[in-house]
Image (cartoon, rainbow, N blue to C red):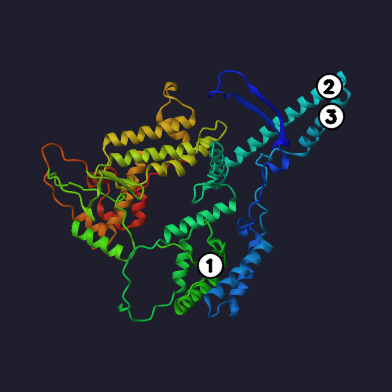
Amino acid sequence: MRKYCKDCKVIPGEPLTTQHRLLVTCLQYPAGNLRKRTRPTPRVKWHNLDKPQGDEVRIAVETYLKSPDSIGSDPNETWNNLHERVLKSAKQHLGITRGKPLTTKETGWWNDEVKSKLKEKKVNFKTWQSTHTEEDRKKYVESKTQAKKLVACSRASFREDFYKRLENATNDKDIFKLSKYRNSQTKDIKSNKYIKDKDGRLITKDKEINIRWQEYYSTLLNEEFPRERMSESINYIAGPIEAITPQEVKNAITRAKNNKSMGPDEIPTELWKKLGDTGVTWLANFFTTIIESGRMPNMWRNKTFDDLQDQLSQWCNRLESKGIRISRKKTEYMYCNLSGSSVDRPSPLVDNVPINKVTKFKYLGSIITSDLNTQADIENRIQAGWQKWRALTGVLCDARMPIQVKGNVYKRAVRPALLYGAECWPMRKEEEHVMHCTEMRMLRWAGGVTLMDRVRNNHIRGTFRVAPIAEKMCESRLRWFGHVMRRDDHHMTKRALNDIPEIRRGRGRPPTTWMSTVSKDLRTIGASPDMTQNREEWRKMIRRADPKP
């Protein structure tokens, strides 16, 4: 440490404590030891699968799948051989990445003209530093001014072309990629790098951090509790297991989405879709081999383990007898008093410990309250919508961004967060007004228009090409109503809709229910429940499309 110290001095003034003063030290460390940069692990360029070189990968994999040696008796060996052939062919034809570049600077505006002008400026600067003449200084200042002007023009031209590409883009992949990048740049802390070990000491090395996380989850997921051993006299279900049909595999591959994270085998879904019937037949035979042998590839294994008082006690005892422990502090319950009685019911007990009673809780992103009021859920969705809106401010608040792109981002990212679960809301006028005000505030903010500008809401919606949110909520309610009405009469949702209990209500106007809201929507569009059986015609009837250009 002493050899790095270049200067040291004491700052006079008010001491921090008795006989202590502020000490300032100037240290100079070698540049090579400040930070070591490591490149990420190279990966296959699967995005090139739709290009001509992707057909070469498909042909190579199809040739291997049609060979008689592609499926053996050991599923683990079979999958490892396929995994090796697929990755080898993909690396050969699609290529591999070398990791992200060490620099994060924007280089789209860099060209030969800019490069030569900056090089000329550096040469003039070195000449001026060596001669110290007024003529060389003026020459350097002139070249510096020209270089700045050229760089500014090049950047402006690049950004203008970039925004034009976004406006004419066929999909929103580039838009969301840009918004995520701009959102990440606004965060002070982008990742939690360092953690503590068992003894509370701070560890900073990547290898030690990975080992610590492995130890933590190994202890958390494999902790053994006192339990009873399962009886060996279990009545197993007799009968052979049916083989997996190619149609089942084809349906599963069709439902799978593109551009999703790959599993441990690093083989994307897009490859199986590109292989067509050859891949479907091979997978069906491979799955049948797994069922017959009772073994699955090691690469697929994921090391994770996954009324009231009497039933609760039996349920807890059964679980804990098998080693699944119920938390006494985190478990909560909610009581819905639909009858309106004033009887104060005692809390259920788990090992004589009362469970905490709550009036609302979140389930699958929706807020459920004890009085079955949707106000809390609507407020939660508004908050979620604003969080999504703030995350996309890099696009929505960019003055240079085309207004059509902003409208597409709002319709595809912000509005779905606002309308999540809206198909089950019994909406009142005041709640529709709250949702309307939230939407208009977002659109006005994104468009740079305030109420003082006296621009009508219809003009703002037409500019963004966005339909009123009340109409979209009506569409979602009627779409869900059609799903329920097309169900079998014994289905749970159909029975819940038909078997509504009669509750004695007090004086005054009855509360707004979901069925009353749906009935009002049906009268608005002039439809009847019988029309829901034809799904295509029903979707056309309830459709509330956004304005077209």
Residue 163 pos. (x, y %):
60, 38
Mark 3: amino acid: Lys
Q: Amino acid at mark 1?
A: Met
Q: Which residue is mark 2?
A: 137
Mark earlier in primary sequence (2, 1): 2
Distance between the Cα atoms at labels 2 and 1? 66 Å
Q: CA distance from mark 3 to mark 1?
A: 59 Å
Q: Which residue is mark 1?
A: 299
Furthest residue toward front: 19
Q: Which of label 3 and label 2 is nearer to you? A: 3
Question: Dot 3: few (<14), some (14–19), or many (≥20) neighbours within 10 Å?
Answer: few
Nearer-the-camera pick, 301 or 168: 301
Q: Which is more N-terminal, label 1 or label 3? A: 3
Q: Give coordinates of residue 290: x percent, y percent.
A: 47, 75
Q: Residue under label 3, please give it.
A: 126
Q: Position of residue 531 (x, y in %)?
A: 28, 54
Q: CA distance from mark 3 to mark 2?
A: 10 Å
Quarter of the image for residue 223 reads: bottom left
Q: Which quarter shows the N terminus?
A: top right
The residue drawn where x is 46% and y is 26% is: 449
Give above or below for 262 relative to 136.
below
Identify the amino acid type marked 2.
Arg
- Quarter where residue 533 is shown: bottom left
Q: Which mark is residue 379?
A: none
